[in-house]
Image (cartoon, grey):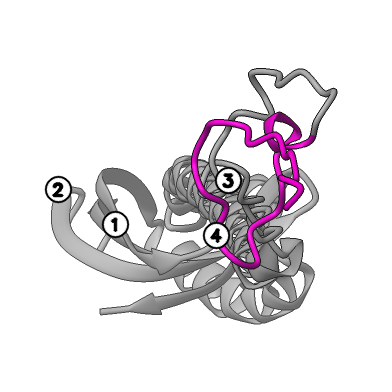
Amino acid sequence: MTETSSTVRPGRRRIAGQRRRPADIPGTTPTPADDRSAEDTRVEAPAPAVDATVEAPAEGGRARAQRLLAGVLGVIVVLTLAGGLFLGQKAWQGRNTEQARAGASATARTAAELVLSYDYRQLDKSFAAARATLSPDFADDFDQTAKVVGEQATKTKATVRADVREVAVRDGDADRVTLLVFVNQTTTSTITQGKPRIDLNRARFTMVRSGDTWQVQQIEGL
């Protein structure tokens, strides 16, 4: 009986279904990479890609917030400017009103002393000076009153001197001011037997603007 010769390579027994390693194949030289076990040759699955669209809601929310903030800031700026203009206008109107009251008061003081004073020896001159401080409409009314007063003054030889003691602003704006005028009138006539008589009077003067000046529009005794 002839003996069949076979060469048996020492090593581990290959498990059924296991891929042969180069070391198990005759004529090959194993490499370090080939010597890895089956467990070491597993291919790791790549990490799942991050979907960029996931961040879209957050980006959209930030954009809306920025637009909202810009809108709010715009409204604040507009309100601030409007408030500044309003306050500036109020301050301007306030200054104009104060200047108007001061100008009307000064004119009323001078006008009251002219309108409420007269001298029977110079009636035309007295009434002309008074008339220059009045508005055109009120000047016509004054002429009628002055005619009656002049006749009486001539009969009694009366002289009246008015002395304004105080002027108080009742109300008014840049074009129209109402004042209370406190005035003392000293009268000398045949009725007083040549002796001065002092009357403490007060009147309401309504002043109106005429260009850069003020005029008396009405006088009411109180």
Q: Which residue is mark 4?
A: 15
**Is residue 31 found inside the magenta-colored segment of the image?**
no
Label 1: how many Cα within 10 Å (few below 14, some 14–19, many 20+): some
Whole-number angstrom distance, CA of label 2 to CA of label 3: 52 Å
The x and y percentages for residue 123 are 60, 53
Q: CA distance from mark 1 to mark 3?
A: 51 Å
Q: Amino acid at mark 1?
A: Ser
Residue named by callout 1: 189
**Magenta segment main secondary structure:** loop
Label 4 or label 3, whichever comes before in sequence order: 4
Which residue is pictured at 74% across the width and 39% down the height? 5
**What residue is pinned by disc 3?**
92
- At a point 61% along the width and 51% down the height, the residue shown is 42
x then y, percent, for residue 51? 72, 65
Residue 8 falls within the magenta-colored stretch: yes
Residue 40 at least partly seen: yes
Q: Sequence-wise, which precedes: disc 2 or disc 3?
A: 3
Q: Nearer the viewer, residue 81 or 57?
A: 57
- Tell me which amino acid carries mark 3: Trp
Callout 2: 10 Å neighbours few (<14), some, many (20+)? few
Q: Residue at x 63, y 36 (%)?
A: 8
Q: Secondary structure at mark 4?
A: loop
Q: Disc 4 or 1, which lies upstream in sequence?
A: 4
Stretch of the chain drawn in magenta: 1-25
Mark 4, Cα crowd under 10 Å, few <14 / some 14-19 / many 20+, is few
Q: What label sits on residue 195 in the rendered view? A: 2
